Structure formats: C-alpha cells, structure tokens
Amino acid sequence: MSPLTFGVAQLNPVIGDLVGNCDRLLTAIQEFAAKGVSLVITPELSICGYPPRDLLMSQQFVDDMETAIAILASKIPSDIAVIVGTVCPNPDAAKVGGKPLFNSAALLQDGKIKQVFHKRLLPSYDVFDEDRYFAVGHGSQIFTLNFKNGDALQIGVTICEDIWNDQKFWDKRNYAEDPVAELTQNHALDLLINLSASPYAVKKQKLREDMLSHSAIVHNLPLIYANQVGANDDLIFDGRSMAFNRDGKMIACGKSFEEDLLVIDFGSAAKPRSQTLGLWGYESDEAEIFAALVLGVRDYVRKCRFKQVVIGLSGGIDSALVAAIAAEAISSKNVLGVLMPSPYSSEHSITDAIALADNLGITTQTIPIQPMMAAFESSLTNIFAGRASDVTEENLQSRIRGSLLMAISNKFGNLLLSTGNKSEISVGYCTLYGDMNGGLAAIADVPKTRVFDLCKWLNCTSSPLAIKSKSGFDNAEIIPVNIITKPPSAELKPDQFDQDSLPPYDILDDILDKLIHQHFSEAEIINSGHEQAIVERVVKLVKIAEFKRRQAAPGLKITDRAFGSGWRMPIAQQA
Amino acid sequence: MSPLTFGVAQLNPVIGDLVGNCDRLLTAIQEFAAKGVSLVITPELSICGYPPRDLLMSQQFVDDMETAIAILASKIPSDIAVIVGTVCPNPDAAKVGGKPLFNSAALLQDGKIKQVFHKRLLPSYDVFDEDRYFAVGHGSQIFTLNFKNGDALQIGVTICEDIWNDQKFWDKRNYAEDPVAELTQNHALDLLINLSASPYAVKKQKLREDMLSHSAIVHNLPLIYANQVGANDDLIFDGRSMAFNRDGKMIACGKSFEEDLLVIDFGSAAKPRSQTLGLWGYESDEAEIFAALVLGVRDYVRKCRFKQVVIGLSGGIDSALVAAIAAEAISSKNVLGVLMPSPYSSEHSITDAIALADNLGITTQTIPIQPMMAAFESSLTNIFAGRASDVTEENLQSRIRGSLLMAISNKFGNLLLSTGNKSEISVGYCTLYGDMNGGLAAIADVPKTRVFDLCKWLNCTSSPLAIKSKSGFDNAEIIPVNIITKPPSAELKPDQFDQDSLPPYDILDDILDKLIHQHFSEAEIINSGHEQAIVERVVKLVKIAEFKRRQAAPGLKITDRAFGSGWRMPIAQQA
C-alpha cells in the first residue's frame, strides 16, 4: 500500500469514558498501522466524546484527559501519526482574559504529543455552548508530515466549525474570520483536515457535502473530514466522514450511523455521486430518520447501562413507531410492551397493540387501570365535590399509566421510553408526569405527519424490519394497517379524537414548522394561507406548554430546531 | 431640587411583556420628572425583562421592541432624559460575521432615541448565554447631558458585565478588554452609569459593593448602578441599585427584592456602612435567603398568572419551609396544604403538619393514599410475582401523592410547588414524577442543613412571619419545634430514616458544597477530611441522579451554582 494513505477513525465514544475511548482509539490506530496508513484522523474531542458539557468544569477531568492522551501517545506504533481531538489548558487565561481551555487537536507521533492545534470558531447557537468552556484558538494550524522516502506533506488542521465560514458558500459571514482561507492564503498546503462532531439533522448531509466539495475546489486542496458517530443524550452523530480530492470530488465516505475505519487513498478515483450517495444514502428521509432514531435509542440504552426497555402500548401510532425503533435498536427480546386499557379504551386499541407486538416479536403485559381510576376517584370525591369532570380526570388516567410504567421500570431495571411526538409536545397535548414519563423521548422531534410517513415506510418491503419479518404478507405488515388508518385518539374519555381538540395534523404541522423552524411571525403564518383563529390558538398553545417541555425527557434531535438543549424559552413570560 | 439629580427605575419587568413594561417605565419616568430628576437610568434590557432567552430569535419580537421603545420615547416628558435597556439590530452581522443583535442602552430625549450604546462584555458562564444572541458591542459609550443653566455632564454608559472586569479587583482578567478603563482613559467623564440584571446569590451583594466602590475610587468617578428586581423562572434579581461618589462611598441604595424609584443627589452625604447595610441588609443570610425565596415564589405565581398554590404537607421540614415561604409570598389564604398519609406515616407526621398549617393559617385537605396503594399493588401482583418489595413500592407512594397533588392543581387551577431541597436533588433521594412534581421547586438550591437553619430562624421573634403571628408564644412558633427536632424520614416504609440511606446531612452538605460549588475532585474532598467510602458514594450518587435533575421543575437559584439553566451535565456518561 502507498505510504500516502490516510485513516479516519470514525468511532463512537462514551462521554467522559477516557480509558475506554482511548482503548478503542488505540485498537483502531493499530489496525490502521497494520494497513500501512501514514496518518490517522479522529473526530473532535475524541478522547472524551462530544459534547462533554460541564464535565469540562472539573479540573480533575481536564487533568485526566491530559494523562490519557499522554498514555495514548506512548502506545501508538511507530511509523504512524495520529491527530486526536482533546482539550488543552489556556495558560494565559487569567492574564489575557479568556476561558481556561482550548478545543484542540493533538498530533501524536514518536510516542509523544508533537504539536497541538486549537479551534478558532466556537459555535454558540442551537445546542452549542462552546464559548462557555473554550477560548478562541490561536497559533499554528499546520504541520509537516515526513515520509521515509523523503517526501513531506504540509497539512492544515481545522476543527469542526472552523470550516463552516466560507463567505462565498454561505453568501454571508458567520464569523469575522475564515480559518480555512487564512491557512490556504498563508501556506502552500498539500492537504486540509477537519475534526468534527457534527450532529445529524434531516437534509444536513447534502449541505455538508456541498460545502466541503466547494472548499476543496475553492482552495484547490484535498480535504479529509472526520466526523463522530453515535448518540449522546439528545444528539445523534451520523458519522459519514468524507474525503474530497482537489477537484471537489468525493473519493471516500464512511458509514452512516455506524463506526467505520475509513482508509483514504487520494490516488483512487472519484466516486460518481450516485455511488457515494449509495454509501451513506437512504432511499428516503424516512429510511434515514429511522436509522438515526435506532442509533439514538441503542446508544442511550447502552451508554446509560440499561439492557432492556419498557414502552406503554396504547394501540396508537406513536407507541407503535417507538416500539419498532426499540425492537430494531436493541432486539425484540429486550422490549417489553405494556397495555393499560381503561373503560374508555376501544376494542381495537387492544387488538392493534397485540398485533403490533406480534409483528415485532415483543412480549406484552396487560394491566387494566380501572381499579386505580376508581381508587383515585373515590379518594378525591370530597375535595372535588360539586365540580364537573374535566381534563383532571383525563390526566389522572395518563398519570396512573405513567406510574405503572415507572413501577415496572424500577422493578425490572429497564428504561422507560416515552412516546410523545413533536406535534403534541409543541402544543402541550400530553400529560406531564403521565405519558411524558420516560428516560428518553424517542420521537420527540418527529412531527405527527412524519410519524405516519415513517410507519407507512416501515411497512414497505424494503424497510429493515420488513426484510427481517417472517410475516409472509405480500406487503409486509410491521405496523398494523389499522393503527395507520384509524383516526388518532387519546381515549381518555368516550368518543374522543385528537382532531376534536387540535387542527388536522397536516395543518398543525405546517403551522408548527413555520413557527418553530422558519421563525415566522403569527402574521406571516396567517399570510401564508392559514386560518387566523387556528394560527392564534396554536401559537398560544405552544407558549403555554413551555412548562411541560421544561420537564420533558431528553428527546432525540433530528432537525435543526428541536426542543431540549437547543431550545431555551422562558416559562413565566407574556411575549 | 437641584438639576443634578438622577433617578434609578428599579422595576420588576415581566419577560416579553413589552407594553406592560413600557407602561410601568413611563409611570416611573413621570414620577421622576415631577421630582425634577434630570436623568433616569433603568436596568439592562428593561423593555423586555432579563433574560428574554430564545424570544430574541423571533424577528417579530425584536421588531416589537423597536416599536415599543419608539412609542416610549415619544411619551417621555421634556426636560428629562432616560437610558433604557433594549436590543438593537446589528446591521453588519452578515457582512462582518456576528450575531444579529446588540444588548444595548438607548438614550431617550426630546421625544426620540438620541443615541444607543452597546454592551461589550458578553457573559457565557453559569446561566448566561449572551454569545448566543448578541454581537460584541462597539462604538461610542459616552454622551453629553446638557442642562438649561449651561452646565453639561459627560456620562459613560456600561451594561452589566462591562463593569465586571477590573483586573486589579479580580487579580486577573475575565475578558481581554476593560470597557471602564478604556472609557475613563480616553474621556474626561463626570459620571459612569451601569445598567444591570445581576441575579441574586448569597454573599453577592458585598462583592458588588466592594467592586463598584473600588471602580469609583480607581477611576475617581461617581457611579450609578441600576439593577433589575424581580424573579423570572429560576432567577431572582435582588435590585439594590446603588450610587457611589468618587471617593467610593455609597450615597444611595435601592431596596432589596422590591421595586424602588431611587433618587440620587451626589450632593448628599455618604452613608456610613452600617446605615447603607441597613437599607438592603438583613440580620443574617437566612433572613436574606427567605426574602429572596418569597420573591421567587410570588413572581413565578404572578407571572404565570396563577393566584393560589398547593403543597403536599408531609409533616417534614422541607414542606414546612415551602409552606411558610408561600404563605409569606402570596398570603396564607392562597395556600392549600394537602396531607396524604399512608400506613407508614407516623402519628406525628399528621399532627406536625396540622400544627404547621394552624401556625401559618393555611387550609388543609387530607387524602389517605392507602386505597391507591392497594389498587396498584393488586394490579401489579402478577407482573411482580416472586419479586421482593424494594424502592419500586416506595416510589409508587410518592407517585400516588404526586398524582393527587397534580389532580388538585388541574381541578382548581393552583400551582403545585415541589418541596425538594438541594441535598436530596443532588444525590437523587427523591422520586421523579412523585415528590419532584410541581411547577416550581422553591428550595431546590437550599441544602438540607440550611433548610434547618431557615426554619430555626423563622421561629426567631424577629422573622417576618413571627412578627405577624398571633401565636402569643414567648418564642414564636412558626415551624412546630417537633418538625425541626425529629430525625428526617421519607416514611415510605416502616422505621425509615434519611440517615439510613445517606450520610448525616452536615457531612453530606459539606461534601456536596466542595463537589458542586468548589469544584473539588474526589481526592481533594477525601483529603479535606471526609471518609473515602462516603465521598465515593456521594460522588457516584450525584452522577447517576442527573436524569432526575434533567426533568426537575425550575428551582429558585440562590447560589453561584444551582441545578437548572446554569448546570449542563451529560446524562449518558462515564466520567
């Protein structure tokens, strides 16, 4: 193999697990060394995993990182160089004013840390708070990689956001400086590398590819982009590390949503777009989102040291989708579905839930909630005397179910997944301490219309579950068709349907998309063609549901604006 | 009155209520004008209230602020100038790279906006995310205030953090630049003003006074500091606006935890420390913390448009303290205490809770939970067959109580206050969806040892509740003495005491203080004199309770490191 091959260690770190992460890095480096790779590139902060958040405020943790990287450096094989993401102390912090750390990349070679490079552009938007921890980097961003045959390469090092400020590509500046432009203007580089931890969002990969290809062309420079893979709390990292030649053609691409050790040889031919797409591509947004959510659930379960999950199965479409995701993520045998019918439950809510469980191969338990309803009702008779039934009694049913699920979670040590979708969490059509209960909200960033699309897609013969299914239907049935076709209902009182309380979901989701994602004003949403009364009501509902969202479980993020760590709204407000 | 008097409008804004906030500002300005005040200074972002957080991402909201301030400017009386906190668009954002807004102060005079000044130092630590919204300010920070008699004053304008970077005072730089030093070096100023929204923390006022006095002396300049008052979600702003003469002596101080229209005449004599302390001072940290928490509860209730609260009264000290805070905040008649005894409840848990309610004058309801316990137990018999009782059954009791309290909250429209203290929230000695239920966690930042201190203080004859009490005891009894003296117990199983599961609270709280506030490592805490096994256990408990804290209600912040918006820890981690 040529001495000019590069490796990208697209690994899935556990946040804070310095020893484990370094072990996995070392194994990858050794594999690359065996293949004759000259330089290995890891994702951003690969020593500790991204994002470490306030763990960085512990001096001990920072010291431990320093120790871990020194040990790692001492163990790497000779004849290979490694660029690892880590933090470095900012020795001048107190003197010049600035945060105490840099977000850095360290060059490990010959058993030691040969050089460090610091990130210059620190994102402070959405889920990113890098200004909270890091000083703006300065100093050299290049190094020389020497080869035994006398060749040498000048390599420029950037970290994630550093490469996201090409004024021509964005048609604006996001930051005052463009580290890539400065690097290429001031140095005759042979290669540009970028260590990233770029979270997944629908449609983002196309943007990344276009941007990176543009940068390669503009700067006439080959480019390697190493991205983290794996999910950490609400964030899903999709991997898909890439290499581009100086013509902006992709010549290598890592797997999507999976670890990968990507070997890059710039001598290799550019891949046609269709082929590169095939490497990470999915037939549809639904296929890609499903893969993302599967990874999100799998990693949260694993990294929180659970083995099994429990899900309340209502016979509705949300819990059906979550059960399917969980079954794919951690195998059917580790998923327990719990049916908790009430006197208001329809016959089909039971049969549909059982049919779903059969299709997925998951175990179920059934616990009717009427006895608890009766006990609460009787105990509250005096204090509620003279007051009509209202949402209180509906919420109680939801809270009884939530308490049963948590009891099962506590007793058996399995993780409760909550099943609320983005539409209902937006408008508060959910019960705090009831159906919102759970350690992870698997579809909290998926609007209801997309929940339907995902379930329909799951029933396509090409979906991963359909392929595994032994159902033998001509059209695979993973999600029982009745779950998809029946009108959504919370079944908390007789003849109740979502659409009695909410606008039709296609209308609701379009309003929510304009409000939340496109930052439209109320007037702009109305002008776009929606009924004024409906828009006003939805906007108001979104505002007053803030107190519920604040206490929601972390929700897997699949869009550029999810509730959770990137959504910071006041509760007590009158805007 | 001299033409050289100044006014500080120390007001309590509602976040986002632009019309209401401007109305209150105008009323204050008119009062100041009637008193002959020349210049009125308001707190930071006084048009929208601080912190507006992601409301600033709505272009409509920003436009509305622009409209509101133009209307306000058109209404202010002639002969008075006003400096109001607002945002300004950053017109060069896309061109130079930067956030789209400035955090600004606008000079309103002669019916219009005469000049704007932008904040330069943007905090990004603890609860502050200003880099998320604002560009670093530039441009003039001075204006000339002309008087009819021909006099003129050169006034320097700074906003909050701008004044918190005196290298000598802090013995380090917090930021690269010191706007105060630059202002005073480059201009012959007559006065320095600072618009602030500085949240309360125990011991912080002394620090502020020392720092501002130092700045006045170092720059030989009179100084006016206008601070916001009022609580917004988790943050309590304590007011205490101040003026210092060029000798660093305080000559005026606004009220603590209350709105105030402070008139400042630099001709007046400096106040002796004891007297200025008397203006905002409290006899003890306990007295001050109680006042802070009372404001926190009162404002959250009011700004979320509730009138009444409901609290679960266990007969324990935490709920007793929260009930006392609520009674003082919104009056006893608006507080409902609910007793929910179980078969494990002691006799004293009932009698103590009733005695407390009597002392405070609050109504109670009693709902035994045994019927719900029996219903859950029976319904779970099959699925739990062969498994011993454990924490599951304890949590169920807590969740039954939490569901009852939420049912009452839903039915009567009162706000549920949760009663967990900082010690138990730290180590997870609390039940998610159970006793953690509530819209606001009133004492979430108060360690258990301080809960005891606060209750003992409440029983001092000088406490506000004791003064109001008609109990006629020699030693006022607000909190029944037995609540303070009995050993803490969750009473979730027979003969259960907190100290069976946790170290003694004085030890636990000292370990937690070193871990959370002083950022000690495990080894450093052990070296400080604590038993290794205990420290290791506490550190581990704090880590694994993160999932509970993530779903906790907003908790009133009274320290420099509270759980909530300023605490950002990963859940899935192995540090």
Image (cartoon, coloured by chain):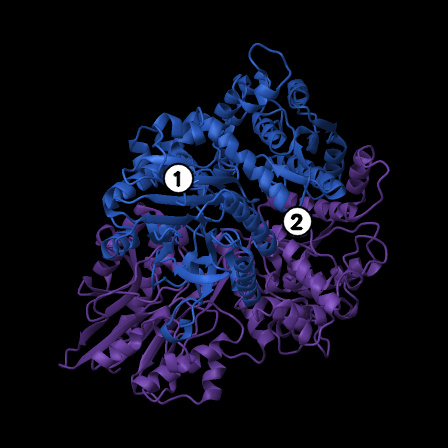
Chain colours: A blue, B purple
Indicate the chain on which mark 2 is placed.
Answer: B
- Residue B313 is at least partly visible in this image: yes
**Residue A297 circle label:** none
Q: Amino acid at mark 1?
A: Asp
Question: Horizontal and vertical percent for residue B288?
Answer: 55, 74
- Residue A235 is at least partly visible in this image: no
Question: Horizontal and vertical percent for residue B8?
Answer: 34, 72
Quadrant the N terminus of chain A occupies: top left
Write down the residue under mark 1. A265
Q: Residue at x 54, y 18 (%)?
A: A459
User: Which residue is the extreme one toward the left?
Assistant: B150
Question: Horizontal and vertical percent for residue B569?
Answer: 55, 55
Q: CA distance from mark 1 to mark 2?
A: 53 Å
Left or right of residue B91, residue A202 in this image: right
Q: Considering only vertical position in the picture, is B48 above or below A417?
A: below
Same subunit, tags 1 and 2: no
Q: Quadrant of residue B317?
A: bottom right
Near-viewer residue (B396 or B164): B164
**Residue B432 circle label:** 2
Indicate the chain on which mark 1 is placed.
Answer: A
Question: Horizontal and vertical percent for residue A7?
Answer: 45, 44
